[in-house]
Amino acid sequence: MDRLIEFIQQPWPWWISGPLIAYVMFSLLYFGKGFGVSTNFKTVCCMLGSCKVSDFFCFNWRDQIWNLMFIGGVVIGGFISSQFLTPDTAVAISQATITDLKTIGIESPGTSYLPEEIFGADNIWSLRSLVFLLGGGFLVGFGTRYANGCTSGHAISGLSNLQYWSLIAVVGFFIGGLVMTHFILPYLIAL
Amino acid sequence: MKHIRFMIMGILFGITLSKGEIISWYRIQEMFRFQSFHMFGVIGSAVVFGIITIQFIKRRKLKDSAGNFITVSTQEPGYARNLIGGTIFGLGWAITGACPGPLFILVGYEGWVFILAIVGALLGTFSYGLIEKKLPH
């Protein structure tokens, strides 16, 4: 048992994680549900009464309770992983990425999951951290609703189903990601 | 609690994405710099595995647990909405280093700090709902 836990505690390679993500999608399909995480933002807006200001939010949120349960599980999964399954939080990113990130002001890339200077609880009320969390989150919420899906709905489910419009959305994901990473992010880190 | 099965799937999903380092800001940076195969391997293998299985489901006309034919449809047609919406999401993804799934995982993994990102995403979704009819789709 100890050896099994030690085995699980190692970082998982892509060929384990990728098929497991597809397996989660199939499990949802088997129970008649579609894999889509960003829909939950819309559901929560609906529950908080946004229907009063826009009929975009007028629907029966109870039909989405299963999805709220799913993201509840997702949060629990993250907690279990951090508490019991990840004794070593270093991420073996490439040397090229380490060098690039140091150039734009990240102190110790890859020594943990996230850059402490941006996402660490001690620095959270700085302008930079609020831009990263609230601003970044805003774009994620706005963009996923505009495109009607995020990585789970378009990149995983949509491409798996050979959907043309999902491919266009994924092209958009990369246009945005590349523009941010290469042209805007250095200025945000310098805030 | 007939929905408990979905919570169990969520737990598996949360553990998979955190152990696979998909929730790492550094892995997303590495992906958008094309400096490692890791993230492309994760998404690529999920999609390849997905295509094969969905083709199998469609050809065999497999049914779900309630006896209905399994269908997948997650797309809305339109260049403007998919390309512009997708680009806005991509801009956000490269800042937070997390798409919606990982944002929720990070609430469990890192703690309350990421609730701020969830609040941001709710504000973004709400704003889209307010101006939806004025946007090109």
Image (cartoon, helix red, strand yellow):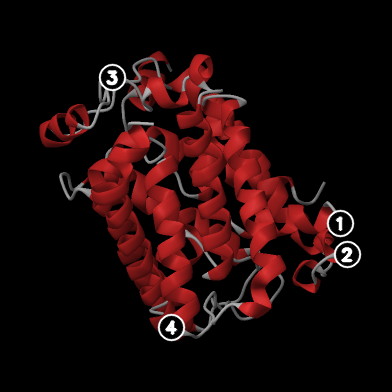
Q: Using the rendered image of the protein, determine whether residue B11 is visible from the camera's viewpoint.
A: no
Q: Which comes before the other along the chain, label 3 or label 2?
A: 2
Compare residues A153 and A172 and report the one nearer the observer: A172
Q: CA distance from mark 3 to mark 1?
A: 42 Å
Q: Residues within 10 Å of mark 4 (few under 14, many from 20)?
A: some
The residue labelled by disc 4 is B79
* Numbered label attached to residue B124: none
Residue B115 appears in which quarter of the rendering?
A: top right
Labelled pair 3, 1 in contact (Cβ < 8 Å)? no
Residue B68 is situated, as x and y percent measured from the top left of the image, at: 67, 79
Compare residues A92 and B5 and report the one nearer the observer: A92
Q: Secondary structure at mark 3?
A: loop
Residue at mark 4: chain: B
Q: Nearer the viewer, mark 3 or mark 2?
A: 2
Q: Residues within 10 Å of mark 3 (few under 14, many from 20)?
A: some
The residue labelled by disc 2 is A52
The residue labelled by disc 3 is A111
The residue labelled by disc 1 is A49
Q: Secondary structure at mark 2?
A: helix
Residue at mark 2: chain: A
In the depicted structure, whether residue A100 falls above or below residue A126: below
Residue B45 is situated, as x and y percent measured from the top left of the image, at: 29, 57
Q: CA distance from mark 3 to mark 2?
A: 47 Å
Q: Quadrant of the C terminus of chain A?
A: top left
Compare residues B111 and A29 and report the one nearer the observer: B111
Q: Secondary structure at mark 4?
A: helix
The residue type indicated by label 3 comes to Thr
